[in-house]
Image (cartoon, rainbow, N blue to C red):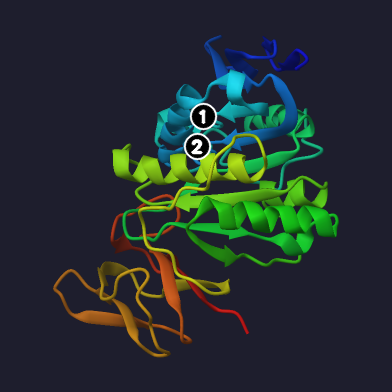
Amino acid sequence: MATFEVGSIRVDGGQVARGNIGVITMPDSTKVQIPAVVVNGVEDGPTLLALGSVHGIELVGTGVLTKVVRSLDPLHLRGRLIAVPMANPLAQVAGTYITPWDHTNLSGPIYWPADEQGSVTHRIAGFITDALKLSTHLVDIHANPDLSINFVLMNPSVSKDAETRATAIRMAEAWGTTVIDWDRNNVHHLTDIALSHGIPAIIPELQRGRQLLEDNVHVGVVGLTNVMKTLGMLDGELAAQSVERYEGSWAAAGRLTANRSGLLWIRRRPGEFLPKDELVATVTDIWGDVVEEIRMPFDGYCWALSGGVGTDNHHVFEGTQIAFVYRKKG
């Protein structure tokens, strides 16, 4: 395998090297690296880019990539893995969902081309774009709050061609958890942009994003390893996941919103079947009087119940999105 270079990393075949895909300078002249590890195999094969913690509070993706990198033997790997375990360290260290200095979401749409003269998050996106252009496949690991299921989001409809679409679907199925089609006509998310350029891409969503718990991280380790096997990077049979998978064809179907401020009381758990008009949650005032009932708008399920994007507190303002919902296709 030829020597591979990305960012500050230069690594020969059969070797592992650490470094970064770019550096951001803070106002006090501190240098903040976007850390990366490349495991370069000894045989030709795919170049898989795997990202963790694009959203700063989703630490579990960092844990997954740390575990996978340490488990891989480059002498038994075809192709290479570019692991970026902390894609947005500025949000990670601040404990925020998006970058706090420019209030920009690293998920996109700020890629390919990235604005090299833009704000700090756009410049991080530029480093990721450079790595993506060297890659043949992308796995962007995300997570939800405690009250959620394990699943994979994909949007194959924006794929450049049929082969890209088919490979993305195979990757999603190989991960081993519930697969939900996040069908959007517009190219918005980083994975949409990859698909539109012919790079198969998926978004695994794990539980308990803020914590590094062995059982939850293990779901991601199994999933990513399965993807590498299905791409021919590793030998072996796909491993079964230890968490429940909901079989069938599923489609993302929007969000539920609290229209009154107060205390949010969850009445049903994620993954439970919810018939139309079923009570999902109530909002009470500080005295415990119910000020709103939030009901299911159709037969379906919640994949996550939260206090809004970036937080799992259950005191809510009016207009807070409190749940993500999905239902069977067709």
Left or right: where does residue 314 sit relative to residue 67? left
Q: Is residue 135 visible?
A: yes
Please tell me the numbered disc located at residue 85: 1
Identify the mark at residue 148; answer none if there is no mark.
none
* Mark 1 vs mark 2, CA separation in Å: 7 Å
Q: Please tell me which of labels 1 and 2 falls first in the chain.
A: 2
Q: Is residue 278 above or below residue 34?
A: below
Can residue 38 be spotted in the picture? Answer: no
Residues 253 and 214: in front is 214
Q: Residue at x 40, y 69 (%)?
A: 318
Please report the residue visible at 45 percent of the width from the left and 69 percent of the height from the top: 246
- Mark identifier at residue 53: 2
14 or 69, nearer to the observer: 14
Q: Position of residue 235 (x, y in %)?
A: 59, 36
Locate residue 31 relative to residue 183 in the image: left or right.
left
Instruction: Mark 1: give few (<14), some (14-19) or many (20+) Cα within 10 Å.
Output: many
* Front position among marks 1 and 2: 1
Say what secondary structure mark 1 lies in: loop
Tell me the quarter of the image containing the N terminus. top right
* 10 Å crowding of disc 2: few (<14), some (14-19), many (20+): many
Image quarter of residue 301: bottom left
Q: Position of residue 303 (x, y in %)?
A: 43, 66
Where is residue 204 shown, x and y percent of the image? 53, 51
Contact (Cβ within 8 Å) of mark 1 with mark 2: yes
At a point 47% along the width and 85% down the height, the residue shown is 297
The spot of residue 160 in percent (x, y) is 84, 54
Tell me the kind of residue under disc 1.
Answer: Pro
Tell which of 221 and 259 is nearer to you.
221
The reply, left or right, for residue 198 in relation to residue 308 is right
Closer to us: 149 or 257: 149
